[in-house]
Image (cartoon, rainbow, N blue to C red):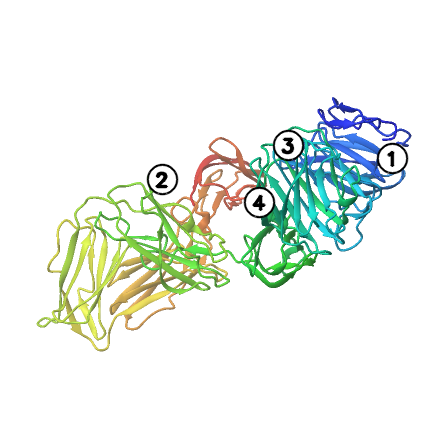
Amino acid sequence: MSDGAVVARYAGDVRKTAGGALVRVVATAWCVAAAGVPVGAGTLAGTVRCGTAPVAGAAVEVYEGGVVVAASAAGAAGQYGVGCSSGVYLVLVSSRGYLAQVHRIVLTSGTTTQLDVELVATDPDLVGWWPMDEGEGTLAFDRSGNGLHARFVNGPTWSTGAVTGACFDGVDDYLAVSSWSYPTVTMMAWVYQTSWTAAGAGGSVIMGRRPEMHVVSGDWTLYTNNWGTRGVALGLSVTGVNDVFTYFGPELQLSRRTHLAFAYDGTAVRTYMDGMLVGSAAAPFGPLPPSVREHSLGNLPFDHVSNRFAGVLGDVRLFARALTPVEIARYAQRMAGTVSGRVTVAGTAVPVAGARLVFRAETGSADEAVTDVDGRYECVLTSGTWSVSVSSIGFRSAVSTGVVVSLGSAISLDIALVQNARPVLAWTGEPGFESDGVAPDIGTPQTVFSFRVRYRDDDGDAPLAGYPRVQILKGGMPLSDSPVTLAYVGGTPSSGAVYAVERALPLGADYACRFEAFDREELQATGTPTVAMDIPDVVSEPLFRVQGVVHDGADPVPGVVLVLTGSGMGRTVTTGSEGAYKFADLPPWAAFEIIPAAAGYVFSPPLRRYTGLSDNRSREDFIAVSSPGYGYFSIGGRVRDRYGVGIPGVIVILDGVRTSSVVTGADGGYRFLNCGAGGYTVSAYRPNMTFDPPVRLLSPLAADRLMEDFTETPYVVRLYPGEVRVIGGLFGPARPNYREHVRVVYLPSRNGEVSMHIRDLRGRLVWFAARPAARYEQGTFTWECTTGEGRPIAAGVYQVEVSGAGVSARLRIAVIR
């Protein structure tokens, strides 16, 4: 500022007045604005934040032609406001500890321009960072947050070509930067040099801290060298001695963008070109001493003829520590060319936020980027040919190859991701595995338990390697060898593939298990098996066997299949030449049937039924009677509602020559196998339901009967006036996972309105309904086990309160999942 006013933004800053005096700033926020600027013509306002937290005290400075024309400081909530004349301005937003930002804005008289800024925390060792991408004005703003703006001296210009930066004419141009003390240092810059100084005359200054010819220990200068070899030179100053020069190769190429850097750690100095170490030497002294000497770019401030630089400097960085070779290489690589674009849902413009992009070069280099909330990304890569793979939860991965990056290139690459179907785990529906994934229902430490699950993926994706697997818990803690990977049994992922594993369990109770799987896109499976469920206890009771012979009254009959069903068990054996069979390892509590079957025979007895064992059974024989006209047949069908939809969970009872029962599956289907010739009855039962026909008579059974269907008929609940009845699921409690709901039936004793409140045991309202009621006209509320907003409720016991129109009742219903 020409009047010598001090620009005070941060407490502790050292600034120089126009008269050359050094002063230390004691203000904690911007406090001086340039005089004579009309305030109020146009307004700039907004907030400054880091994430969601406001950045109080952040400086907002409005520049025109490199001069501050207005400024403000963010308040406690991060809000700011500043006014100035209509026009186009550069706005610098900065705060100590954050990377500064520069925005180009247009202010119009009588209007407010909104500019909300989100700052990012800076590297605490970053002293100065000058991208030099402003393109106007006489300042190169320091983006480190330390306010060390580079001042244009003798007329440097802005580059208008493919290389961004400040352009030096090689005559007298340079940039001046305030002082900063540091014991160790790294300096780096992108250099585009267009000509050399005269051969042997010296080197062109990239950056230095050497404001005068007289040297002081700790001053330094980075040159491009023309003292015989055209490489890089670093001059380190020692008191009373001219620069101690260290020369490094290889030769710097003119009119080519090159990344130069050096690092000094107090013991050695290392110099880099395009991220590669090109030389090192021992330090002439230890840590750099404190200094208040200014820095300069493009020449030394006393305009040393042999040190003038011609070309473009950009993205200059200064660190108060020696960066590692890997860090320097990364900065060099990141500045070659950019690939940017959007990741969207295929066929739409919907952005995919948080998608991960992995870039891989043919040379083996790799880099990553993540999309923002608008699905946008940007990655700066070295020159070469790259491939990019894109992944995001819920989408199928995509790969794009042959992305060619060159120096200064800016490639636009939009990518569309196809949504990925989530895999589902379900019970297999096999005998013994209809409603869970473990059999048998109980056993001893010698029992081999089978764990089975069905994996389905509508995309046809096979499970991720190592899945599905089962986590086996005891007392809530995994067993030492859990989880266990299941092996493929059969089927396809698109229609449902079965996986299984067998293992014994230690003696004890309080067992549980849950299944888990991911598809090849690492999308986690859902389904009932993924929720922990109780599994059989392992007891120390003895095990028994049942065995016998199948004969025709004189000779053994080989080839007879005997089926054992019941108590979660499903086993088969086939008689050999001796006609013998045996079922072993049967627990004493087991209830089961053994049924023989062979074409051309009927058997006496047709089956053997057991309700428990107290010892071994050794002579459980069957007599096979040749009967060419009769054999063993199947009885089956479906149970449907009045709309033709299958009803799961219906108990179907078989009686007659053989007695058994099954529960309908998800499609309402049922089947009884190995039914011998004779008479049978079949009936269907489910609480609060009636079926047509009530009973099916099959006599005599001489062939498969697989169309013995039942259809639901309206169920009438008879009540007395004022009575209320709560009706749950098949077994009493409502099971929403099995499409069961709660019905509340009532009979009003007078006209009025009946209301129903569902509350949890703490008295909190879960669901409410009300409707008009007429005397002696029965009504029904149906609760789908959800909240009033339609969200599924947790398992537990709930209070049902019904009142109005002569009805008053408080009941309870259990909901299980």
What amino acid type is highlighted by mark number 3? Tyr
What amino acid type is highlighted by mark number 1? Cys
Residue 84 numbered tag: 1
Asked whether the viewer can see residue 19, the reply is yes
**Is 446 rendered above or below residue 701?**
above
**In the rendered structure, which disc, 4 or 2, sits on the residue that comes first in sequence?**
4
> Disc 3 and disc 1: Cα gap in Å?
39 Å
Q: Is residue 315 left or right of residue 123?
A: right
Residue 182 numbered tag: 3
Residue lying furthest bottom in this view? 628
Asked if the residues shown at circle 2 and circle 1 are in contact, with their CB atoms under 8 angstroms apart, the answer is no
Residue topped by disc 2: 476
Crowding near the residue tagged with mark 1, few <14, some 14–19, many ≥20 C-alpha atoms within 10 Å: many
Q: Nearer the viewer, mark 4 or mark 1?
A: 4
**In the rendered structure, which disc, 2 or 3, sits on the residue that comes first in sequence?**
3
Residue 652's image quarter? Answer: bottom left
Q: In the rendering, at what x and y percent does residue 154 appear? A: 84, 41
Asked if the residues shown at circle 2 and circle 3 are in contact, with their CB atoms under 8 angstroms apart, the answer is no
Residue for point 73% across, 24% down: 28
**Quarter of the rendering occupied by the N terminus:** top right
Residue for point 71% across, 27% down: 76
**Quarter of the rendering occupied by the C terminus:** top left
What amino acid type is highlighted by mark number 4? Ser
Q: Nearer the viewer, mark 3 or mark 1?
A: 3
**Is 474 rendered above or below residue 344?**
above
Residue topped by disc 4: 280
Residue 65's image quarter? Answer: top right
